[in-house]
Image: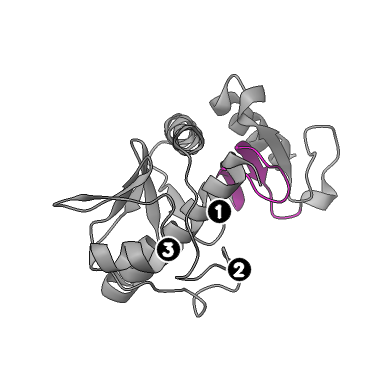
Amino acid sequence: MSDLESTRTSLHAIAELLLAGPQYVRSRSIRLRPSPGGFATVAPPDVRVLGTDLVLADRSIPLDGRRVADVASEAGLTPRRLNEVYADGSGLGEDHVLRIEADAARQIADGFQRGTQALAVFAPGTEQTLWPEHFDLAITLDEVNYGISPGDTHLAVPYAYVGPPSPRELDGTFWNAPFGAALPLTQVDDLEAFFSEGRSRAAG
């Protein structure tokens, strides 16, 4: 497993078990948000990931090489799965040993920040959410999803995507994925233009 894949997998587990899960118990929301250098809750408890650390109001806790359960204990959090909210997810539990490499974590965080900025220009005022289920940043506009994934089984690297409601009905080289269109971030110079082209093509 590459550093990027192991880091992405571990960050996904933290997003679900130590951010979205505890937030759902306390605030009834699973939504997360990108933050500089990582990602964060949107409601209490106030928890975020910065690089390779879990950050609370009064301290930072290293993540790499530790079990989710041990990080949770030190942070005063109760790991919480979201099986009753969605059927998919990381599939990992509190015994998962975290493997988070600094450069890979930075690459993922930078992708989310780049996506945040582009989506704000593309669709001003539209609520952006970092979803813990697939660990992707997304908006929905006229039933079309636009967002950034840090990588998955479709593409192993961070990528931008456009997901229309009926992708198989669309023709052309732009629609290159089962769910619509996807391009590695390294191949997209102008994210806002990519999203805009997706919107135009999805509208037919």
- Is residue 165 a member of the stretch shown in magenta? yes
* Quarter location, residue 37: top left
- Location of residue 15 in the rendering, given as x and y in whole percent from the top left corner: 43, 57
First along the sequence among labels 1 and 2? 1
Can you identify the residue that label 1 sits on? 9
First along the sequence among labels 3 and 1? 1
| Residue at disc 2, secondary structure | loop
| Residue at disc 1, secondary structure | helix
Give the magenta range: 143-166
Can you identify the residue that label 3 sits on? 67
Can you identify the residue that label 2 sits on? 88
Circle 3/circle 2 CB separation < 8 Å: no
| Residue 74 visible from this viewpoint | yes
User: In the shown orientation, is residue 38 left or right of residue 111?
Assistant: left
Give the spatial CA distance, label 1 vs label 2: 14 Å
Give 142 or 91, whichever is nearer the viewer. 91
- Location of residue 159 in the rendering, given as x and y in whole percent from the top left corner: 62, 37
Tag 2: Cα neighbours inside 10 Å, few (<14), some, or many (≥20)? few
- Location of residue 54 in the rendering, given as x and y in whole percent from the top left corner: 31, 51
- Inspect the image, locate mark 2, and give the three-letter code of the amino acid beneath it: Asp
Question: Residue pushed farthest top?
Answer: 189
Residue in view at x 44 percent, y 53 percent: 65
3 vs 1, front mark: 3
